[in-house]
Amino acid sequence: MRRKSDLNKPHSARDELTRKARNVPLVDVLAFLDATIDQHDPKRWNTSIGPISISESKFYCWTHQRGGGGSIDFVMLLLDLKFIEAREWLVSKFTLEENIKSKIFREPPLHTPIPQASPKNLLHVMDYLVQQRGLLEKDLIPLINKGVLYADHKRNAVFVLLGKEKSLVGAELRGTGQTRYRGLFKGSKRTQGFFYAGPEDAKYCIVCESAIDAISCQILFPGWLSLSTSGVWASPPYLPKLLRRGIQVFCGFDNDNAGHLNADRMIRLHSSVIRMVPAGKDWNSDLR
């Protein structure tokens, strides 16, 4: 039986509301409900009712041995709601007329220098990073869950720069489509923070030119802290603080003239820094 409030809505309005609710990306719903990506399968999520596999708008719950399509059916299963209840839940939790928002992939606050997130492009970005850049899913998933790696609306891979007290100070972008764009998001302040991977209490730290190289080093040198200066940079202002903590810092700039020149400059400024040169052009090429 339809609710009275539903019957009062024009038929076309109900249809449009249903269509929009059904098209909310499943990953948005999962993120909002604090589900986590499986460490071994990025299409499989751990939820309150057990593991669920998703493929675009399709899903299958292994515990309940039940599948379906669209977010309304998805929410009916996850939250044990009826059709109209599930649709109204989606409407109340997501701004359907604007970009979808969620806990992990929430839109940045006003004036924050990082781009808007697009969860529907995440699998594309992950495929690029794994298939074309040789990175490992098990190393990408913690960064995604932490919110420092995501996809934007242009299918760029976004690597968040964190500053003092983990404030958002910018983002590195890497194009994953036909245009291989690489650069900083407009308004980023690389003087105030950096992208990093690995344990913060590590004894060794390697400084790289890009976020992809930093993740590559995390794989090549497990247990090390690796960070990106977002371009070749001999005197990042946060380097002295790292050295004062007693961390052995290695300069891992690219194996080219700019990398060697700026590594020499860094060592002249900080004599305890040790040069570490990739065998190929950069650490990602070594990983591949």
Image (cartoon, helix red, strand yellow):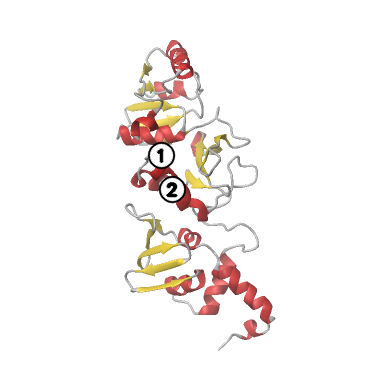
**Residue at 45%, 34% in the rendered image:** 211
User: Residue 41: which numbered mark, if any?
Assistant: none
Image coordinates of residue 284 in percent, x first then y, are 39, 33
* Residue 77 lies in quadrant: bottom left
Decide which of 110, 210 is in the foreground and name it.
210
Image coordinates of residue 243 in percent, x first then y, are 40, 21
Image coordinates of residue 207 in percent, x first then y, are 42, 26
* Direction from residue 83 to residue 141 in the image, left or right: left
Q: What amino acid type should be assigned to the residue bearing mark 2?
A: Met
* Direction from residue 243 to residue 166 in the image, left or right: right
Which is more N-terminal, label 1 or label 2? 2
Decide which of 69, 223 is in the foreground and name it.
69
Looking at the image, residue 259 lies above or below residue 128? above
Quadrant of the rendering where the N terminus is positioned: bottom right
Q: Disc 1 designates what residue? A: 133
Image coordinates of residue 82 in percent, x first then y, are 49, 80
Secondary structure beneath label 2 = helix
Crowding at dot 1, Cα within 10 Å, few <14 / some 14-19 / many 20+, comes out as some
Furthest residue in direction right, as rendered: 10
Furthest residue in direction top, as rendered: 268
Q: What amino acid type should be assigned to the residue bearing mark 1?
A: Arg
Label tally: 2
Looking at the image, residue 104 lies above or below residue 265? below
Crowding at dot 2, Cα within 10 Å, few <14 / some 14-19 / many 20+, comes out as many
Decide which of 160, 277 is in the foreground and name it.
277
User: Residue 126: which numbered mark, if any?
Assistant: 2
Are discs 2 and 1 less than 8 Å apart at CB? no
Secondary structure beneath label 1 = loop
Can residue 201 be seen? Answer: no
* Residue 245 lies in quadrant: top left
